[in-house]
Image (spheres, rainbow, N blue to C red):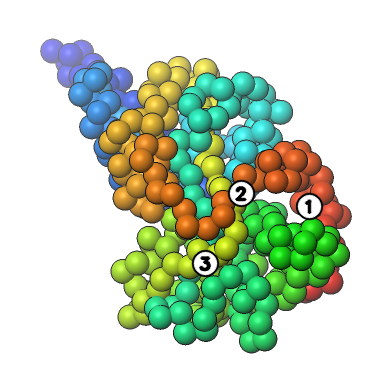
Amino acid sequence: MAALVLFAPAVRLLAQDHLLNASYDVSRELFQEINPAFAAQWKTETGRDIQIRQSHVGSSQQARAVLDGLPADVVTLNQVPDLELLAAAHVIAADWRSRLPDHAAPYTSVTAFVVGAGNPRQIHDWDDLVRPGIRVALVNPKTSGNGRYTFLAAWAFGLRHFGGDVPKTRAFVAELYRHVPALAQGGRAATTIFAERGLADVLVTFESEASVLETGVNGKKFELVNPSATLLVEFPVSVVDRVVDHDGNRKAAEAYLRFLYSEPGQKIIANHGFRPRIGGPAPAATVLDVEATFGGWPQIQRQFFADGAIFDQIIEKTY
């Protein structure tokens, strides 16, 4: 009898699965709803409970944490280079983009502006961000994909606005960063600078972040502005092969990511302001593909974000 009593807790422990999802900074609310929905489905399908834990920092910070040993079972990040970093180190499989539909990106967004209700500063497009006195909240491209998409979207606008003139585009982007009081480390930090601390007139971020602010903050209301040109943001995901193969929980990790593509998962994604692959909205702005526009992520990294590249050159003269 004593042996049976001692054995019973072990049986219950074995009947519970565990996952750690290493995600980016502004996905908290999304996965707070995704996780219990998946857990309920997993329980129905397998008879097993599952505990899902979350980790949230800027996407590039998160990738480096996983590279350095954070035992995440899955990564759900916001830019391809962060997963390519893990693939190059053999933390995830080299073919990660072909293992799930839509290049392993179950949902998308676009880069957009969030302003105060009624748009008191009349901010409608990228060139409005460099008007005298306008303060802009955005993310550091060195720490988050959110910041990289913002930088690239501003650059793409500049090229269109100035007829392909690179020096004028560079000057425009440099002027934009002179209007940033402080570079945030992640998307939620930028939201705090804008909405809670009131240190900026406009927030440049993923369109989905506007849904976080739709109920207002400290009595203040906000609204979304779609600029004339923006970039499609794809959110890539993968199991962390090094971890799931070691811990033996690949089945649960793969099922978790497949749930993001399911009808229930896509509905939750849409409810949080992201663009689902099933029935997503058509954007009003001109949406550009980042890799087609700039020649692929390796080229983007070398030209703009490597140490000493264009972003560093601009920031060195700005701050």
Residue at 76% in and 65% down: 162
Between residues 50 and 270, which one lies in front from this camera angle?
270
**Circle 2 SS class:** strand
Tell us which disc is closer to us: 1 or 2. 2
Q: Residue 121 shows which numbered tag?
A: none
Kindly identify which residue carries mark 3: 113
Q: Are marks 2 and 3 in contact (CB under 8 Å)?
A: no
Q: Are marks 1 and 2 in contact (CB under 8 Å)?
A: no
In the displayed image of the protein, which residue is found farthest to the front?
Answer: 163
Say left or right for 125 vs 55: right
Q: Residue 288 shows which numbered tag?
A: 2
State which quarter of the image contains the C terminus.
Answer: bottom right
**Circle 1 SS class:** helix
Q: Is residue 210 above or below residue 217?
A: above
Under mark 3, the amino acid is: Phe
Residue 75 visible to an observer of this rendering = no
Say left or right for 66 vs 296: left
- Between the residue at mark 2 and the residue at mark 3, the CA separation in whole angstroms equals 16 Å
Between residues 72 and 282, which one lies in front from this camera angle?
282
Under mark 2, the amino acid is: Leu
Residue 282 percent coordinates (x, y): 43, 49
Q: Are marks 1 and 3 in contact (CB under 8 Å)?
A: no
- Between the residue at mark 1 and the residue at mark 2, the CA separation in whole angstroms equals 18 Å
